Image (cartoon, grey):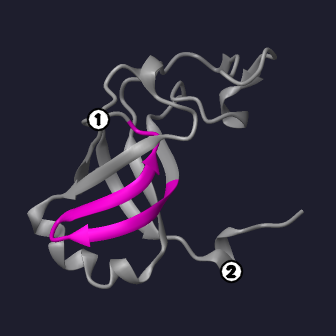
């Protein structure tokens, strides 16, 4: 398996304990070789960001979420503790300036490596029970 970073997250949060549950205003700086991949990204109101969340524990399979007091499996929560350090989050795309994407809120720490970006489609991505 081979993964290639496409960008990096920038914000004011470094220690994981300081991250708010819904994230903070952030930018994603796309690497120059992927500039062409941004064509028409600003046509989307929101994007999905996949990132390498390497500061989480890998051998923990159950956690108590910040918003609760009941033990849960890591596949049932959005904890950075997981077998593979892949994070997924959606964010409102505020604007694009060159290689920089400005996002309303992202729950990845400053310096987190971005693996991929995908457009958010309301007709496909919203599910009603």
Q: Nearer the viewer, residue 77 or 73?
A: 77
Q: Does 88 sit above or below residue 58?
A: below
Q: Which residue, as the protein is rendered here, is positioned at the far right?
A: 129
Is residue 104 found inside the magenta-colored segment of the image?
A: yes
Q: Secondary structure beneath disc 1?
A: loop
Pointer 1 residue: 110
- Quadrant of res 95: bottom left
User: For the point 14% across and 59% down, which residue is it?
Assistant: 31
User: For the point 70% across and 16% down, which residue is it?
Assistant: 64
Is residue 46 found inside the magenta-colored segment of the image?
A: no
Q: Which residue, as the protein is rendered here, is positioned at the far left?
A: 32
* x, y percent for residue 11: 29, 39
User: For the point 64% across and 20% down, which residue is it?
Assistant: 61
Task: Answer left or right for 109 relative to 97.
Answer: right
Q: Residues within 10 Å of mark 1 (few under 14, many from 20)?
A: some
Pointer 2 residue: 123
Q: Does 108 sit above or below residue 55?
A: below
Of mark 2 and mark 1, the one earlier in the sequence is: 1
Q: Secondary structure beneath disc 2?
A: helix
Residue 104 appears in the picture as rendered: yes
Task: Answer left or right for 37 relative to 58.
Answer: left
* x, y percent for residue 37: 25, 76
Task: Answer left or right for 61 relative to 35.
Answer: right
Q: Which residues are magenta?
A: 90-108
Task: Answer left or right for 70 relative to 53.
Answer: right
Q: CA distance from mark 2 to mark 1?
A: 31 Å
Q: Nearer the viewer, residue 39 or 23?
A: 23
Residue 1 appears in the picture as rendered: no
Magenta stretch, main secondary structure class = strand
* x, y percent for residue 113: 28, 43
User: For the point 77% across and 16% down, which residue is it?
Assistant: 71
């Amino acid at each position: 398996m081979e993964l290639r970073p496409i960008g990096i997250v920038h914000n004011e949060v470094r220690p994981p304990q300081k991250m708010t549950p819904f994230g903070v205003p952030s930018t994603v700086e796309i690497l120059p070789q992927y500039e062409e991949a941004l064509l028409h990204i600003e046509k989307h109101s929101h994007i999905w960001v996949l990132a390498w969340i390497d500061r989480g524990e890998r051998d923990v399979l159950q956690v108590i979420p910040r918003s609760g007091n009941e033990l849960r499996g890591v596949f049932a929560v959005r904890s950075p503790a997981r077998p593979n350090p892949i994070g997924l989050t959606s964010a409102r795309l505020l604007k694009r300036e060159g290689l920089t994407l400005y996002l309303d809120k992202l729950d990845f720490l400053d310096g987190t490596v971005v693996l991929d970006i995908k457009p958010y489609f309301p007709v496909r991505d919203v599910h009603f029970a």
